[in-house]
């Protein structure tokens, strides 16, 4: 309600008493849609700080203001040096006008949308200065005709007499409802409106209230009254209200951010746990590589040379027969050997899936617990919220670190360097095209399919040779050369890796590469 007519009606005379004889010495902006006006009488200073944004306006009267040296621009140059003669509020409007000695005036249009500040020089031939130049029509803004604003102009038989007083706003209407306005007969409604208008014109006090989850400055005791302030000091009321409003807005913004972060964390963790459980169930309830290899070895005598498939009795499912796919170009023993190797990897995957599901379910449960704790924090206490947020690692820096830890790749740490390994062709593209920085070191087993490997750069620190070698071993291990005795690995800065147009997932073109010969291994698993 600080920009409501009835409050401006109280504020204007107080500003006249305070500012008569004060001279404008500063008019500038440091933020978008902000206008700061500094005045002085030679011994004291007075500040007006206005937010003139389409999303909402705010008039503040800070007791002091420190202008920054950067990101500050002077505005409305004609206003400088003007001496205040009087301050007035336009009738039944959200406009405050400062009149200056000599005839110049500053009009503060405090509308909810399209707000503006308009300076009219004393010389009618001089151009009008606008804070928002895009609103050119504001140069001709004038008070509405008084006759059109008179309540008597409303129809006598109007079913809602409050409509004759649009400046009542939502607070005035809310107060009317507490007096039984809606079901009352027409004559009672008129009497109630007259009573409320009288209270607005001669308020008993100013109130900082909480209504519909919003902190408001009111001339009426409506909603939850948080503070009652003297009616003879609208300047002091505004100075009490604005810091509380801004603190409450900051609190609500941070509260919403933390709640959204925890809800997203709980949902993401629960979804990841569900996927891990589903994959684990599929692995545990289908015929694995080891069973297939066992069947091949148990029926070697029945498998003809060069066969592409063979049907054998499945002793894992008595009474059932199973069709085994074979490679005609390799012996059944070689096929079984490869399947046993895959079974070992599958066993490792099963273990990792179970651990991942448990970990992610724990993370989801922890996030839900934090949401319950958040709801129990003292309402409106920004300091308490920030302390709790920092205590549980939910501040901006910790959130960024947690997001980095949730990368969708195999991750290894070596001597302070992070090594990322792609999981499949699509994941390789994601790693190389989206997550890798141009100066990261990129590795890949030469001339065969395999995982993309990235060593993340550390500013000013070249990758040590042992770290490079172990990353190359990973690139060889997660490739078709895993079983070779030695594997050549290509490496180059990521900026020399590009994705040709039309290339298949995982395919890239490499320039300025070097080659390192290593033994395929996962040195981190062995350790």
Image (cartoon, rainbow, N blue to C red):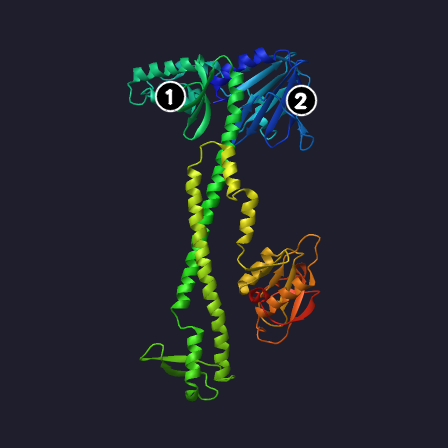
Badge 1: residue crowd in 10 Å (few <14, some 14–19, many ≥20): some
Instruction: Reply above or below: 495 against 295.
Output: above
- Front residue of 70 and 94: 70
Q: Find residue 93 and report its horizontal and vertical position in percent.
A: 49, 19
Q: Quadrant of residue 149?
A: top left
Residue 273 lies, with reference to residue 70, above or below; the image says: below
| Sequence-earlier tag: 1 or 2 | 2
Q: Residue at position x 69%, y 69% from top?
A: 515
Q: In this orientation, does residue 121 appear?
A: no
Q: Secondary structure at mark 2?
A: strand
Name the residue rendered at 46%, 27% in the picture: 215
* Circle 2 Cα neighbour tier, 10 Å, few/some/many (<14 / 14–19 / ≥20): many
Q: Nearer the viewer, residue 220 or 103?
A: 220
Q: Circle 2 sits on which residue?
A: 26
User: Is 130 on the left-hand or right-hand side of 273?
Assistant: right
Kindly identify which residue carries mark 1: 175
Name the side, left or right, on which 277 lies relative to 35: left
């Amino acid at each position: 309600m600080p920009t409501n007519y009835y409050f401006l009606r109280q504020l204007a005379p107080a500003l006249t008493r305070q500012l008569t004889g004060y001279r404008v010495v500063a008019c500038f902006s440091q933020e978008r849609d902000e206008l700061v006006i500094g005045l002085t009488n030679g011994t004291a200073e007075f500040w007006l700080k206005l937010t003139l944004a389409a999303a909402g306006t705010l008039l503040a009267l800070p007791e002091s203001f420190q202008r920054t040296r950067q990101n500050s621009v002077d505005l409305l140059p004609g206003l400088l040096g003007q001496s205040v003669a009087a301050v007035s509020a336009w009738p039944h409007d959200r406009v405050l006008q400062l009149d200056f000695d000599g005839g110049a005036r500053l009009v503060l249009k405090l509308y909810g949308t399209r707000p503006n500040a308009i300076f009219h020089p004393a010389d009618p031939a001089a151009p009008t200065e606008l804070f928002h130049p895009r609103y050119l029509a504001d140069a001709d803004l004038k008070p509405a005709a008084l006759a059109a604003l008179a309540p008597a102009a409303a129809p006598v038989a109007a079913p809602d007499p409050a409509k004759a007083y649009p400046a009542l706003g939502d607070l005035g209407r809310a107060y009317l409802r507490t007096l039984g306005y809606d079901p009352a007969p027409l004559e009672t409604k008129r009497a109630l409106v007259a009573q409320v208008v009288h209270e607005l014109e001669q308020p008993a006090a100013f109130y900082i209230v909480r209504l519909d989850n919003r902190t408001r400055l009111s001339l009426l005791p409506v909603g939850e009254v948080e503070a009652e302030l003297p009616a003879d000091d609208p300047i002091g009321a505004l100075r009490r209200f604005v810091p509380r409003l801004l603190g409450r807005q900051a609190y609500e913004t941070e509260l919403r951010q933390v709640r959204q972060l925890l809800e997203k964390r709980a949902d993401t963790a629960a979804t990841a746990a569900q996927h891990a459980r589903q994959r684990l169930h599929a692995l545990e309830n289908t015929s694995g590589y080891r069973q297939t290899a066992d069947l091949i070895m148990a029926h070697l005598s029945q498998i003809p040379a060069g066969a592409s498939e063979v049907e054998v009795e499945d002793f894992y499912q008595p009474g059932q027969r199973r069709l085994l796919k074979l490679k005609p170009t390799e012996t059944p023993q070689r096929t079984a050997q490869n399947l046993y190797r895959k079974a070992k990897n599958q066993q490792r995957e099963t273990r990792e899936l179970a651990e991942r599901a448990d970990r992610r379910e724990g993370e989801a449960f922890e996030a839900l617990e934090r949401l319950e704790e958040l709801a129990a924090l003292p309402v409106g206490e920004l300091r308490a919220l920030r302390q709790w947020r920092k205590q549980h690692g939910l501040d901006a820096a910790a959130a960024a670190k947690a997001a980095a830890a949730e990368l969708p790749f195999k991750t290894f740490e070596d001597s302070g360097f992070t090594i990322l390994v792609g999981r499949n062709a699509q994941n390789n593209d994601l790693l190389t095209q989206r997550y890798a920085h141009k100066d990261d070191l990129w590795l890949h087993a030469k001339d065969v399919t395999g995982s993309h490997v990235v060593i993340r750069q550390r500013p000013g620190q070249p990758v040590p040779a042992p770290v490079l070698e172990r990353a190359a071993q990973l690139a060889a291990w997660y490739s078709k050369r895993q079983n070779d005795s030695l594997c050549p690995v290509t490496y180059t800065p990521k900026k020399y890796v590009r994705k040709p147009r039309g290339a298949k997932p995982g395919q890239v073109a490499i320039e300025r590469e070097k080659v390192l010969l290593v033994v395929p291994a996962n040195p981190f698993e062995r350790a």
